[in-house]
Amino acid sequence: MARGFNRVEFAEAMHGAARRRGLRSGVDKARVRKWEVNGVRPDAVSQTYIAEVLGIPAGDVDPAAWPAWLPRVDQGVVPLGPANIVPALREALHTMDRRTLLSAIPGSALVILAGSWAGTQPVALAAGPSRPGAAVGEDVVALLEETSARLNTLATEQRQHIAPLYDAHLARVTDLIEGQRYTRLLGVRLHKLAASLSQTVAWIRFDHGQHGAASRYWIAGLHNAHAGNDRDMGAALLSDLAYQASWRDDPTTAAGILTKALSRTTHPAAGSLLHLRLARAQAALGERSATLRSLNAAERLLNAGDTDDTPAWCSWMSTADLAVDSGRCLLDLGDTTQAHRLIAEGQALLPASRDKTRGVFLAYRAQGHLSRREPEAAAADALEALHLAERIGAPRCVQLVRDLAPAFTPYRTAQGVPELLHAVA
């Protein structure tokens, strides 16, 4: 189930594992049921096929220890509540263990989680140290905050080199939260720090295509933003889950999450970003009127707030993002000429420091060129996006370009297209 198989599909996948060895397997759904329900032990060869189908290294297979060598499966969404703050963090951190199979989180469960967040108030934290041992002091928390801030200033291109440091930093903060040896005010700061770190780690996982892990880090961050009574940060984490849903072609889930998140967003810049992401989901669903309303709200709110108190997580939001994402919405709605103009306008406005976003924008512009039957310009943009994404270590953005490749097939002889297809291959 964690891998998305029913018993028939699992048996067919095992047949494929056998064929790759020039052999045949007689496994059927009844046999799989015996393994699952009746406690029947598969023979050693079948256990090898099972490992291959589940993506488990062959060296982990121990036929005599069946089923102990199988990895555990995580439990999905951890419900909001004070007792679940640390378990949510631990579940996310355990995704680093290659012996954990991540089950896909259904979109409906994420929308329910967003509704729970929107409809509940955080429980007040304890007023002081509640467990024996030395209390965590101001200096420790300040150092952790400073380190986190320094890590978050690194460009995407550099983060790939020290990704384990983010994991270790979050693990240490989690240990301190679990210990509960701090004052109420320091506890609030630790929860806010855990939320911010969880968001950063989630984006690193997301950029590398590890969607199950990314979801769980965003959910862990939501728990801590809720505990720290930071509504805008909570909305940000839900918005990230929605962005992931849109990226994975599930705009219905994205729209459902964002509608809940917007009900508790307070800062105009935060509201602008959420409305813009909602517009993207609505455009993918073909909802023209709703898309235009959300785009108008995003533009109005972007210019309404005081930039001095803009939350760090959305401080990058700019007219460049508004222009490009508006163009992407219009592209989905079929307004190709206006869409192309807006995407080009936003590309020109984007600061040089935002390379990952530039790569995504270039891929969008390539798609716009293709819709206008301009393969030469599309190939140039797509190739630049591909090289940029490879340089900064963003496989998600590489995949975005690869997904465009089939659309270039009718233009194989156009200038730049052979080079692009070769690079993608």
Image (cartoon, grey):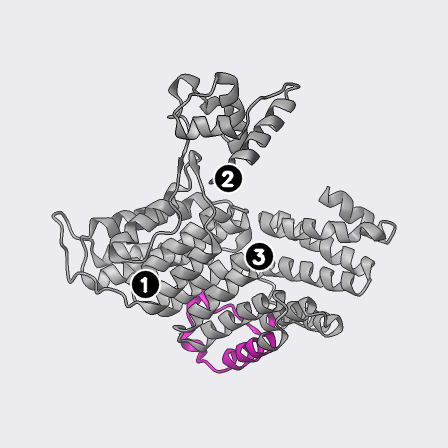
Which label was assigned to residue 226? Answer: 1
Q: CA distance from mark 3 to mark 1?
A: 25 Å
State the residue position of label 2.
3
Q: Which residue: 50% across, 28% down?
A: 30
Lateral position of residue 81 relative to residue 326, left or right: left
Q: CA distance from mark 2 to mark 1?
A: 31 Å
Q: CA distance from mark 2 to mark 3?
A: 20 Å
Q: Look at label 2 and name its amino acid.
A: Arg
Q: Which residue: 85% across, 54% down?
A: 415
For marks 2 and 1, the one nearer the N-term is 2
Marks 1 and 2: in contact by CB < 8 Å?
Answer: no
Marks 1 and 3: in contact by CB < 8 Å?
Answer: no
Mark 3 element type: helix
Q: Position of residue 340 (x, y in %)?
A: 73, 70
Q: Position of residue 225 (x, y in %)?
A: 34, 62
Q: Position of residue 289 (x, y in %)?
A: 61, 77
Lateral position of residue 413 relative to residue 59, left or right: right
Residue 43 higher or lower than 136, as above or below: above
Which label was assigned to residue 62? Answer: none
For marks 2 and 3, the one nearer the N-term is 2
For marks 3 and 1, the one nearer the N-term is 1
Residue 252 higher or lower than 216, as above or below: below
State the residue position of label 3.
247
Q: Of discs 2 and 3, which sits in the foreground?
A: 2
Mark 2 element type: loop
What count of labels does the image hold?
3
Q: Is residue 168 visible?
A: no
* Magenta highlight on residue 309: yes
Q: Look at label 3 and name its amino acid.
A: Trp
The quadrant in which the C terminus is found is: top right
Residues shaded magenta? 291-320
Lateral position of residue 262 relative to residue 351, left or right: left
